[in-house]
Amino acid sequence: MFYANQVRFYLNDKLVEMDVTPTQTALEIIRALGATGAKEACSEGDCGACTVALGLERNRYLAVTSCIMPATKLHGRHVITVEGLGTPENLHPIQEVMYRHHATQCGFCTPGFIMSIFCLLANNSQPDMAAFRKALEGNLCRCTGYQHIVQAGEDLLEKLHEGLLSISSLFPDFCDAVWDDLEQSQPPQVVPVSAGVLPSREYHLCYSLDAALHALDADPQNSRVISGGTDLFVESNVARRFAENYIDVQRIASLHTFSMDDHELTIGAGVTLEELLQDARIHVHFPLLSQAIEMMGSVQIRNVATLAGNLGNASPVADGACALLGLDASVQLTSSQGARSVPLKKYYLGYKQTERHPDEIITAIILPRKEGGFGNFIKTGKRHNVDISSVSSALSVQVDASGLLTDVVLAYGGVKEYPALATQTMALLQGKKIDEILITEAMACVEAEFTPIGDVRGTAEYRSLLIKNQLKKHLLRFIKRGEDA
Amino acid sequence: MPKKTRHLSGKLHVTGRSLFIGEEHISADMCHVAVVFSTCAHGRIISMDAVSAKALSGVHAIITAADIPGENNIAHGNNDNQPLLPADTVMYVGQPIALVVADSRQVALEAASRVTVNYEEMPAILSIDAAVKANQLYVPPRKIQRGDVARAFAEADCIIEGEVKIGAQEHFYLETQRCLATPDEDGGITLYAATQSTTEVQAVAARVLGLANHKITVDVKRLGGAFGGKESQGTLWAGLAALAAHYTHKSCYLELRRIDDIMATGKRHPFENTYRLACSADGRILGYEVILKSNGGAYIDLSLAILERGLYHSDHAYFIPNISITGYACKTNLPPNTAFRGFGAPQGIFPIEIALQQAAEKLGIDPIEIRKRNCYITGQTAPYGMEVCDPVGREMLEELEALASYKQLRNKVDEYNASHQYHKQGIGVVPGKFGISFTTGFLNQGSALVWIYTDGTISLSHGGVEMGQSVNAKVASVVARTLGVSMDRIRVESANTKRVGNASPTAASTGSDINGYAAENAAKKLKRRLSRMAVRYFSERGIACVEEDLVFADDAVVSGDARVSFADLVNFAYTHYCDLGSHGYYFTPGITFNREKGRGTPFYYFVFGAALAVSQVDLLTGEYECKKIYIVHDSSQSLNPDIDLGQIYGAFVQGYGYCTMEDISFNDKGQYLALTPSTYKFPTICDIPPTFKIKLLDLLREHASVLGSKAVGEPPFIYGLAGWFALYDALKRSVPQGSAIDLAFPATPEAVLMAKVQSAKKETV
Ligand SMILES: Cc1cc2nc3c(=O)[nH]c(=O)nc-3n(C[C@H](O)[C@H](O)[C@H](O)COP(=O)(O)OP(=O)(O)OC[C@H]3O[C@@H](n4cnc5c(N)ncnc54)[C@H](O)[C@@H]3O)c2cc1C
Ligand code: FES
Ligand code: FES
């Protein structure tokens, strides 16, 4: 039997109650409801044409790529699309600057850009141009060369900074009424209804860990735990690989915790990458992780994606996993039998194979705290923004009183079947003082340690060069703390 | 006033109200079409099993070549024979071999994925080398020659030679290929097609369905980007949708997924070129010999015209007294490569630019200086015998030096390099000279249809297709200026074969030239008629005037103190039996070319400009960043400077992506390896530097187009090459003087690092 879910959400000012199938995407639904400003141009989260604002609570709207968002996730949410902001007769201030600065040519990408800008401003009242560009890194335009969009941004930010425009005036009028209703009708539960459609059976939107474990226990082999869905829904859209059951754990409140004591930081599996990036504790105590997350996907992706998903996907080029490995993290796995903690260095077994049993859910990630010291993350790809690594690496070290390295951890992504430690090089560096000779030795050592493969993201030869040169960069940065390297 | 007009659909675009293909004209029983693609680069179809696909609920039909009622050939305007669906032999991976028609897109895609095909594989030719060896050429080699090349080399002080391999480029129009086909009552079909060429789609759909052209209507309101990728390549998908609608008698919609679009459609042609340059000691070009070889893919498509444009641009901005240009168009088992902004010119231009760059190094001359010394001057002719009219390459380079404060910039970059070990900066410069006109002469014609309604508003149809370039705004502004009316009186209609038949493709940057002239001609006819009416109008009111004294401006017609509003005059004209509809036609005069002799006048005029880029390279990883861009561009009497700027920004960035990060190769099975934007990377907003300056120039000239304007679509694409030269220069600064740098095209971070490493290896040998 197939099950569709009955969801209830708002699309702009309209209440929608409808059945959606497990693998339907939010974009499909939004467009079918007539909001065709949201476009499909890649269906894998990479172009931003489908960007909409997803309201999680009053005044909190996130840019998301609706093409890889499971439609069930719309339940209880408020979606604002470009149609909700303004009309041709009465342009919204963002639409007005984009229009006036010729920031649209063919127009196919334009709604996505506008929604990204809206979400930037809705969340960050005083962005600068660097933040403006960063907020649009996930929106591709093939026509404009972006410069007119940049000029529109400069104009807009100037108006904001001069107080000619207020953030609150950017929110459409209907938002308040929408939230009055949504807040009253919370907490909603989706209702499964039977329907005969392709190709998956069920999508469980779980609100408690128990419910999730129960659903998972029913058929662990044919179920996929889903958090942000930024890996899983690319798989279904592009590769047409579908799971029979999806078990969505992202609404489980107990997975959204974030706690730090003197020894460790525990990140709940539901915490999104963007939440981590905005968290001062991560910046201060685990800068390496912030560096890595900043380079992962675009804001649309980071708004929903999780570290748990990054580990769950077990990709050899997972940046989060590489950074976590470099921080000596552990992963907490929970089944209906109980919870266990596995050090990340023991987590990977082979290509896309991990210690996680099918009936286990990743519930937390635990980072040991080490004060002082040095941490650095490097990622090399074809393009600086929104690209998958050819090679990535993370180095963390402590320095003892006499200036010698201790607690050396050096992790790499993109060099073998899974993110891996460079154990020989770690041993070589341990207890040493960095100088030119040691750098040369360490580079030779690490180069010999891995035999990477060649693929579309880099030849084996290039990867080998990156392995040693990234280490050089880490060490130069360590000595010089920045500058030329 | 019309000069300041914004994008006519701008307000619709920014509010999401503009409708694209598949978003309107939809009926409740519309079917979705999915394509079964060949997975084999060359082979015979032995069997096809569609049983489990047919069994899916919601599947209406599976359609193959046997179901084509007319002639199974979609080749247009050339002598090739390209099937809509191959009956037995597949020629490339991604070639459509069957269609599934179903209730929903999901069911159609699922069913298509269940169709299994068995092939008898045949040897596939993929590379240019293999094609040349097997003599798989579309035509005998083309040649253009002048002077005595051998003597030039004998007398040269400096000889440069080399080989360049230039990769393909994916269009990545944001809107993938698509078409909605709806049956008409009389057996005809209306196609809402993603095409730059309504005429070609009409003719081909009629041919494959065995119908007369007049039974096929093609309507295009707007495209979500095209860049040449929908000039000929929209035809296949429109033909398939038409076939599905004809077969099922239902509305049928076909929309490619991105991954299928990249897999199955042609790209910018890869070229492999060898060059030899002979210079005097002071850097003057004495002779140049270049061989261009293009990878055309499995059907000829536009390969010949593209090769020709490559040949005609091999001299680029430079006068070369002794020259030999040879071109090969190779037939391979890749998707047929096709038009892409620049149309072969970038591949023809790159060799002379790298050769000059290397000559400058060898002779110790500044790279801008050597280019200036060789720019065409008045009276000189191109290798194919046409005089290069209004040559301003040298002035452009001088303007560029001023705009970028070149001397200071060079000093700053040198200072940076002196103080940085692991990062180096470089400066790249290229001039631009781009010939305007279709090199296929008869395509240089446009038409327009203008109706003035009795309330004084205007409906304008013209042969151009709007794809973001604002051809509609430009053509409308020509009408507005001619009739002295405001832009909001004018509604530009969709490109439709019923209103404008036999339209040339909107391509070769000619859209606003030929259609703008045609619209001007139509508007002038109306103006003449209205002038007669105005004289009558005024005389009935006791005011004597002559037609010559009338001024059409500000939505009124004025003679001295007398004035009639445009709307009143129109109404007067209508009630006095005046024809208020008019068709305008234009063809570009004097375009001829003799292919056997390699002589003729392929262009009406040239567009000049120049660009400079500063980039910074990370010598440890090969990554880079573009720091500054300066461009000067000859826009003459621009119809709309803001629109022109948008075209230049966009073209630069597309050209910059082409020569840097845009990397699409294929494996030995003929499959492209970067099929999605997760692997095919083109610039984001973060790749564009804060300093991105363009100066539009209007140098006095004789040769320009409608209302003194010039075409702008393609010429600035060339400027992007400055990005490649900036990386090349940065790498040069990282190695000892005189060491060679062999930088690939595109210069991906990997290519940059490998160039650096290989140069160092050569040094130590
Ligand atoms: C445009 C784009 C850009 C991207 N860029 C990057 C990048 O730069 N670097 C990078 O590393 N990745 C990148 N990714 C991949 C992806 O975003 C990350 O891997 C992300 O961390 C996945 O998180 P998620 O919550 O969305 O995972 P999901 O898709 O929900 O799940 C991924 C996998 O993890 C499993 N899983 C999820 N949650 C749990 C759980 N709690 N317990 C057990 N298993 C679980 C799922 O079953 C699935 O196998 C990108 C993806 C896109 C679409
Ligand atoms: S369609 Fe490209 S990101 Fe959604
Ligand atoms: S305007 Fe065409 S893709 Fe951005």
Image (cartoon, rainbow, N blue to C red):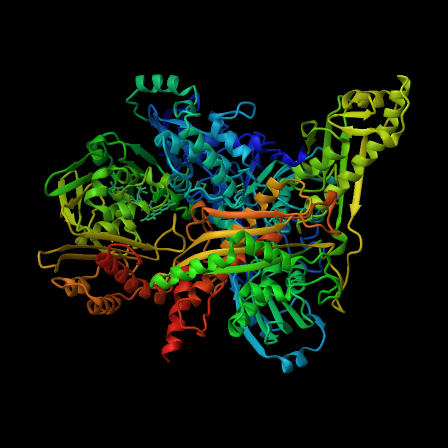
Q: Quadrant of residue B307?
A: bottom right
Observer-nearest of B260 and A471: A471
- Estimate the x, y position of residue B96 in percent, counting from the top left: 56, 52
Q: Residue at x 52, y 26 (%)?
A: A91
Q: Is residue B154 left or right of residue A327?
A: right
What count of labels does the image hold?
0
Q: Quadrant of the C terminus of chain A?
A: bottom left
Q: In the visual, does B302 lie left or right of B707? A: left
- Relative to A345, does residue B573 appear above or below in the rendering? above
Depth order, front residue of B763/A446: B763
Relative image position of residue B572 (x, y in whole percent): 84, 20
Pick the front one: B136 or B356: B356
Estimate the x, y position of residue B489 in percent, counting from the top left. Answer: 70, 27
Name the quadrant where ligand 1 sits: top left
The answer to whether residue B88 is seen in the rendering is no
- Residue B471 visible, this orientation: yes
In the picture as drawn, the residue positioned furthest to the bottom comes out as: B154
Whether residue B696 sits left or right of residue B543 in the image: it is left
A35 vs B667: above or below: above
A227 vs B244, nearest the viewer: A227
Q: Residue at x 50, y 50 (%)?
A: B260
Q: Quadrant of the N terminus of chain A?
A: top left
Q: Position of residue B81 (x, y in %)?
A: 67, 59
